[in-house]
C-alpha cells in the first residue's frame, strides 16, 4: 500500500514537472508569436496602412499642380519616380494631373526635367490658374509675366552651383494674322558659383523645362547665356546644325524684310492696310560668317556667308480707303486710285531693294479689306473712354479738385488760345477776299481799302501778342536754369514746333538727397497740346510734393492721366510720353523709367561710348493700373545721361531721311568728346538736328535734358 502511495506521489510530481516545463514552452511560444505578430503588423502598417493614412490626410493638403495634361502611361511613370523619392503626391481623378507638396515643387520641376518629364503634358504655374485666356493673353499682362519669371527663377535657384538667375519672357505684340505672329521667347542669364561646370544634359534639361513651361515655345525660342554674355545653349555637331542655321537665317531675312516693308507702308496708308510676304532664296558661299539673330542673345557661326540670290514678294493692299463724306460728315469707303496703288508698289520695291537682274518678282493683289469691325470698334472705344472719364470723375472727388486747380491755372492761356483761334478764322476769311483794282470804284472806294489794310495789320499784331503770351506762359512752366546739386550739372532745352507746344521738362526736389528729373511729350503740338501740358505739370508737382517714390509716382501719374485726359471731349484722345527718373545725389544713382519716349542715352566716360538704355513702356494714360519698369544706373565722373523726345530722332531732312538714333548717339558722343557741359550739350544736340534738316520746317517739338557728373 505504501508502495502504491509512493508511486502515485512520484507520478503527481512528474506531472507537475511536466506541467511547469509545458507552461514554460507555451509562454516561450506565445512570446515568439507575439513578436512575430508585432513585426508583421508593423510591416503591414508601414506598407499598407500608413500610405493610405497619408493619402487620407493628403485630402486636407491639396498641394500644387506639378504637371497637367499627362497621358495615363506617363502619369504612371512619374508616380513611380515620386514614390522612389518618397515624395507626397496626389493624382487627379482623370489621371492627367499630378499634385505635389508646395514646398518641394521647385526642386521637383528641375529633377523631373533632367529625366525628360513631362513628355505628353506641361508644367503648371500659378499664373495660369484656371483662366480661359490663351497663354499669350495671360503673359501680355506685365504682372503675370513678372510672376512667371519669378517662379522660373525660384525653380533654377534650387540648382547647386547657381548663385543668380535672371529669366525674361518676351511676348511680341499680337498680329492680325496667325502666320505673322512672332513666337514667345525666353532668355535666361545664369550666374555660376566658381568652378561650376555644366554638362550638355543640364543645358538640355533647362531648355526642356522652359519649353514645357510656356505653351508654344520651342527649343529655338529659348536662349541661355552666362552673366558675361557667353552663349551657353548646347551646340551639337556643326555639320548637323548647318542646314538648320541656314534655314533660321533665311527666316530672319524674310521676317526682317516683311517687317520693314510693313512698317514703311503702314506710315503711308495706315496700319493693317497692307500685307507683305517675302520669300528669300539665299546663297551660302564657303566663307564663314557670324549671324546675330534679331533677339540679340545668340550668335551662331554659319559655314557659309549668305547673299540674297532671288526675292519673291507678294503685296496685298486694301483697294478701298475710309474718307469723310463732305456732305454728311460720315465715314465712307471709296476706291483707291490705280495710280496710288502703283506708287505704293514702287515704294515696296525700294524698301526690299528689288533687283530685276536677280530675277526678283513682285506681285500686287488689290482687294477690299473688311473695315466694319474697325469702325464699330473705334466708335465703341470712344464711347467707352468718355464713359470711363466721367465715371472716374464722379467717384474720385480728389481728381476733380486737381483738374479744377489745373483749369484755374489755365484761365489766362485758354483766353489767349481762344482769341488766337478767333483771329486765325478772321484772317482766313480776309485772305479769301481777292484784291480789287483801285480804279473799280463800283465795289469799294480807296478809303475802304485803306481801312481794310489797317484792320489786317491790327489783327496780325493782336494775334502775335496773344501767341507770344501763350508761349511765355507755357515756357514759364519749365525751369529757366538747372538745379544746384553738388557734383552734378543738369540742364534742359525745349524748342516748340509752333508758338506753343506739347513738350515739357522739369526738375523737382523730392527731399534733401533726391531729385526727379524728367521730360514729357503730350500727343500733338501747338494749341491742342497746351492744356494737357499744364495739367500734367500740376499733377506731377502734386505727386512729388506728396513724397511718393518713383514707382508709386509713375503708377499714380499714369492712372490720373488715364482718367483725366483719355476721352476728354476738350482735348480728344491724349496720352503723355515720359522719360526720366529719380536721382539719388549721395550715391550718384539714377533710377530711370520710360513711357513711350526714345530710349535714354548714357555716355560712359570710362569707355567713351554711348549706350542706349533699353526701357520700354506704354505712354502714360494708355493702360490704367500699370507698373513701369525701373532701371538703376550708377554714374561715374564724366558720365552724361541724355533724355530726348521723338522730335529729335524723327526730324527729317528734305529727302525724308530721319536724324535717327545713330546720329543722336554720335552727336552726344561728339559733344562729350569736346567736353561740353550739360547746358551746352542740351543746346548742341538740337543745333545738330537743325544743321541736318536745313531749311525744312520743324514738324515736332524738340526737347533735350542732359545730366552731367562733374569731377
Image (cartoon, rainbow, N blue to C red):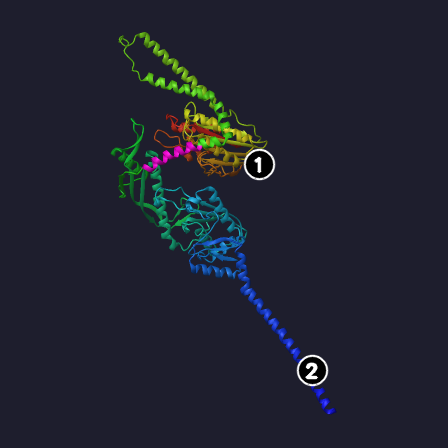
Q: Which residue is mark 2?
A: 16
Res. 587 mark:
1
Distance in Å between CA atoms under marks 1 and 2: 101 Å
Question: Which of the pair 675/665 is nearer the observer?
Answer: 665
Q: Position of residue 82 (x, y in %)?
A: 50, 59
Is residue 280 something that shows in the picture? yes
Res. 120 mark:
none
State whether the magenta stretch is mostly helix, strand or loop: helix
Residue 341, by quadrant, is: top left
Question: Which of the pair 427/243 is nearer the observer?
Answer: 427
Q: Is residue 188 above or below residue 663?
A: below
Q: Is residue 686 above or below residue 125?
A: above
Q: Residue furthest front?
A: 1
Q: Position of residue 345 (x, y in %)?
A: 28, 37
Q: Residue furthest left?
A: 338
Q: Position of residue 129 (x, y in %)?
A: 46, 48
| Residue depicted at 69% across the width and 82% down the height | 16
Dot 2, crowdedness within 10 Å: few (<14), some or many (≥20)?
few
The quarter in which the N terminus is drawn is bottom right
Task: Give the mark, 1 or 2, whose residue is nearer the N terminus.
Answer: 2
The quarter in which the C terminus is drawn is top right
Dot 1, crowdedness within 10 Å: few (<14), some or many (≥20)?
few
Whether 384 is among the magenta residues is yes
Is residue 671 something that shows in the picture? no
Q: Which residues are magenta?
A: 371-388
Mark 1 touches mark 2? (CB < 8 Å): no
Q: Is residue 386 above or below residue 293?
A: above
Identify the element where label 2 is drawn: helix
Q: Nearer the viewer, mark 1 or mark 2?
A: 2
Q: Residue furthest right?
A: 2
| Residue depicted at 55% across the width and 30% down the height | 545
Amino acid at each position: 500500500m505504501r508502495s502504491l502511495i509512493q508511486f502515485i506521489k512520484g507520478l503527481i510530481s512528474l506531472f507537475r514537472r511536466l506541467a511547469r516545463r509545458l507552461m514554460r514552452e507555451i509562454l516561450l511560444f506565445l512570446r515568439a508569436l507575439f513578436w512575430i505578430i508585432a513585426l508583421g503588423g508593423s510591416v503591414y502598417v508601414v506598407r499598407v496602412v500608413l500610405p493610405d493614412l497619408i493619402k487620407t490626410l493628403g485630402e486636407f493638403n491639396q498641394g500644387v499642380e506639378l504637371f497637367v495634361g499627362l497621358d495615363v502611361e506617363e502619369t504612371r511613370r512619374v508616380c513611380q519616380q515620386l514614390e522612389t523619392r518618397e515624395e507626397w503626391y496626389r493624382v487627379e481623378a482623370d489621371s492627367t494631373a499630378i499634385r505635389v507638396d508646395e514646398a518641394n515643387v521647385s526642386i521637383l520641376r528641375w529633377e523631373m526635367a533632367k529625366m525628360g518629364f513631362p513628355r505628353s503634358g506641361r508644367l503648371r504655374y500659378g499664373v495660369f490658374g484656371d483662366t480661359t485666356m490663351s497663354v499669350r493673353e495671360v503673359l501680355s499682362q506685365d504682372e503675370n509675366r513678372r510672376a512667371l519669371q519669378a517662379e522660373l527663377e525660384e525653380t533654377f535657384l534650387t540648382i547647386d552651383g547657381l548663385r543668380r538667375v535672371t529669366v525674361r519672357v518676351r511676348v511680341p505684340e499680337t498680329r492680325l494674322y496667325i502666320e505673322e505672329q512672332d513666337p514667345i521667347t525666353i532668355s535666361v542669364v545664369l550666374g555660376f558659383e566658381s568652378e561650376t561646370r555644366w554638362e550638355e544634359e543640364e543645358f538640355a534639361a533647362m531648355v526642356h523645362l522652359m519649353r514645357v513651361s510656356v505653351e508654344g515655345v520651342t527649343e529655338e525660342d529659348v536662349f541661355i547665356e552666362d552673366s558675361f554674355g557667353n552663349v551657353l545653349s548646347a551646340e551639337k555637331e556643326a555639320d548637323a546644325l548647318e542646314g538648320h542655321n541656314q534655314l533660321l537665317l533665311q527666316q530672319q531675312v524674310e521676317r526682317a524684310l516683311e517687317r520693314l516693308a510693313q512698317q514703311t507702308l503702314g506710315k503711308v496708308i495706315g496700319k493693317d492696310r497692307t500685307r507683305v510676304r517675302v520669300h528669300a532664296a539665299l546663297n551660302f558661299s564657303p566663307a564663314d560668317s557670324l549671324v546675330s539673330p534679331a533677339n540679340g542673345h545668340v550668335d551662331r557661326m554659319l559655314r557659309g556667308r549668305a547673299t540674297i540670290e532671288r526675292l519673291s514678294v507678294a503685296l496685298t493692299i486694301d483697294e478701298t480707303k475710309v474718307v469723310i463724306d463732305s456732305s454728311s460728315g460720315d465715314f465712307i469707303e471709296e476706291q483707291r486710285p490705280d495710280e496710288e496703288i502703283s506708287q505704293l508698289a514702287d515704294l515696296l520695291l525700294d524698301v526690299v531693294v528689288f533687283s530685276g537682274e536677280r530675277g526678283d518678282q513682285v506681285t500686287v493683289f488689290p482687294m477690299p479689306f473688311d473695315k466694319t469691325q474697325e469702325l464699330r470698334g473705334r466708335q465703341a472705344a470712344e464711347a467707352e473712354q468718355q464713359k470711363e472719364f466721367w465715371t472716374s470723375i464722379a467717384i474720385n472727388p480728389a481728381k476733380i479738385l486737381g483738374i479744377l486747380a489745373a483749369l484755374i491755372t489755365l484761365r489766362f492761356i485758354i483766353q489767349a488760345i481762344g482769341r488766337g483761334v478767333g483771329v486765325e478764322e478772321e484772317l482766313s476769311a480776309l485772305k479769301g477776299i481777292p484784291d480789287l483794282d483801285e480804279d473799280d470804284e463800283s465795289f469799294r472806294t480807296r478809303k475802304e481799302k485803306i481801312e481794310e489794310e489797317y484792320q489786317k495789320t491790327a489783327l496780325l499784331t493782336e494775334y502775335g501778342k496773344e501767341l507770344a503770351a501763350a508761349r511765355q506762359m507755357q515756357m514759364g512752366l519749365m525751369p529757366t536754369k538747372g538745379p544746384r546739386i553738388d557734383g552734378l550739372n543738369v540742364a534742359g532745352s525745349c524748342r516748340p514746333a509752333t508758338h506753343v507746344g506739347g513738350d515739357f521738362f522739369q526738375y523737382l526736389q523730392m527731399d534733401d538727397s533726391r531729385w526727379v528729373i524728367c521730360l514729357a511729350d503730350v500727343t500733338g503740338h501747338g494749341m491742342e497740346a497746351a492744356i494737357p501740358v499744364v495739367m500734367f505739370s500740376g499733377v506731377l508737382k502734386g505727386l512729388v510734393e506728396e513724397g511718393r517714390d518713383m514707382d508709386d509716382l509713375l503708377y499714380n501719374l499714369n492712372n490720373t492721366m488715364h482718367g483725366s485726359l483719355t476721352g476728354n471731349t476738350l482735348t480728344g484722345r491724349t496720352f503723355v510720353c515720359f522719360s526720366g527718373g529719380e536721382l539719388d545725389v549721395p550715391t550718384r544713382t539714377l533710377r530711370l523709367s520710360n513711357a513711350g519716349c526714345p530710349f535714354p542715352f548714357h555716355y560712359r566716360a570710362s569707355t567713351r561710348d554711348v549706350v542706349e538704355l533699353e526701357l520700354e513702356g506704354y505712354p502714360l494714360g494708355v493702360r490704367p493700373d500699370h507698373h513701369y519698369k525701373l532701371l538703376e544706373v550708377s554714374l561715374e565722373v564724366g558720365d552724361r545721361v541724355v533724355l530726348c523726345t521723338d522730335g529729335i530722332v524723327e526730324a527729317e531732312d528734305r529727302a525724308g531721311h530721319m536724324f535717327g538714333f545713330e546720329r543722336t548717339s554720335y552727336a552726344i558722343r561728339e559733344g562729350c568728346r569736346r567736353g561740353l557741359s550739360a547746358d551746352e550739350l542740351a543746346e548742341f544736340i538740337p543745333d545738330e538736328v537743325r544743321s541736318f534738316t536745313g531749311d525744312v520746317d520743324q514738324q515736332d517739338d524738340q526737347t533735350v535734358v542732359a545730366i552731367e557728373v562733374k569731377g
